[in-house]
Image: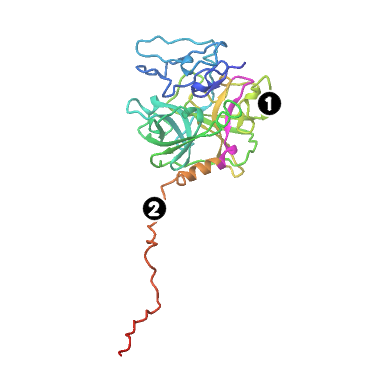
Amino acid sequence: MNSITLKQPPSARNASFGLGRLKRPTLASIPKGFTVDRTKKKLIRLGAGISAGLGAAAIAWAATAANADSAEGDNDAGAMVIGGEEVAEGQYPWLVGVGANSTEGTPYENQFCGGSVITEDVVLTAAHCVVETEDPAELAVFSGSVDLESEDVVTTEVADVHVAEDYGDPSQFANDWALLKLAEPVDVEPIGLDTEAAEFETFEVAGWGLTEDDEYPALARWVEVPFVDDETCAAEDVYGAEIDAASMVCAGDFENGGIDSCSGDSGGPLMGYDEEGVLTLAGIVSWGNGCAEAGYPGVYAEVSAFTETIDEVIAGWGGGGEDPEEPEDPEDPTEPEPTDEPTEEPTEAPAN
């Protein structure tokens, strides 16, 4: 069985899948009393004997506290290469960080996933990033700069979360998408959604995930990755039945590896140019076998598979923009309507 790498930590419901490797702490996965040193984090990967009854705590971060030693995982735990280069300000204005809504720490320290602004107050991200969230207010979105240490970063609280109702069906990571309704609009250019399952030749993917230097950068990075067809991706010696072609798309250098999304990129955008040369959102960073390994491309949620459902959810939230004005109260139906017909004057009875 392959070593499956979510691009963000798996929840308790999927922790027993194969040789799971946590990629980034969620709100529930960081032990109380510990802080994560992003420059020294190491990962522990359990072996094939993981039982189905083990929860998310069985696969844990070796998060280094001030007085804790870093733990070493398997010898492939450091084989995380993304390639690419730094994102320029304005290159992907819709790219945002998703993380903990906390007064402690900086956006760089609190971010654990990526996302894409698709309306002024709605962000599209991966379901596995937020599926364990009990209170939407625990989450925040970081926008305004691709440098999470910049003073221009704006932190916006999340007001509501919608996780795909069919997330994990028919395979474990199928339909890996979620929407975040923001407490207020953000001044960010949204990205359009790919409405056709076109086979792009190449994509661009961006985020704050682990680099080839084994570090989490404060400044987002991007890389170009080629499309990998469904037949290749679903081959038995690749991902087999874990690929749901209806809701997933694969991308990466299949022959050589070396370019890929990785830990911390989950929820971020996989983008392709439409016929008019405009970048559209084609996928959402989801999972894969390690990072940038030859023969194992990255796997992304395919946006075109659920654009109609996204529209329905946003419409239920009031259109994804400002709340519509309340209509004026209708007139009291019990009051008689005025009439232009004259009323007859009562006539006196004749005197006897």
- Three-letter code for the amino acid on which mark 2 is drawn: Glu
Which region shows up in magenta? 293-308
Comes first in the chain, label 1 or label 2: 1
Mark 1–mark 2 CB contact (< 8 Å): no
Q: Is residue 308 visible?
A: yes
- Residue under pointer 2: 326
Can you give x and y, in whole percent of width and height, for residue 74 in the image?
Answer: 53, 10
299 drawn magenta: yes
Question: Outermost residue, bottom direction?
Answer: 352
Instruction: Write down the quadrant of residue 250 in the picture.
Output: top right
Q: Secondary structure at mark 1?
A: helix
Question: Quarter of the image containing the N terminus?
Answer: top right
- Three-letter code for the amino acid on which mark 1 is drawn: Thr
Can you give x and y, in whole percent of width and height, for residue 16 in the image?
Answer: 54, 17
Position above or below: 74 against 56: above
Which one is in front in this view, the residue at disc 1 or the one at disc 2? 2
Instruction: Write down the quadrant of residue 173 in the picture.
Output: top right
Q: Residues within 10 Å of mark 2 (few under 14, many from 20)?
A: few
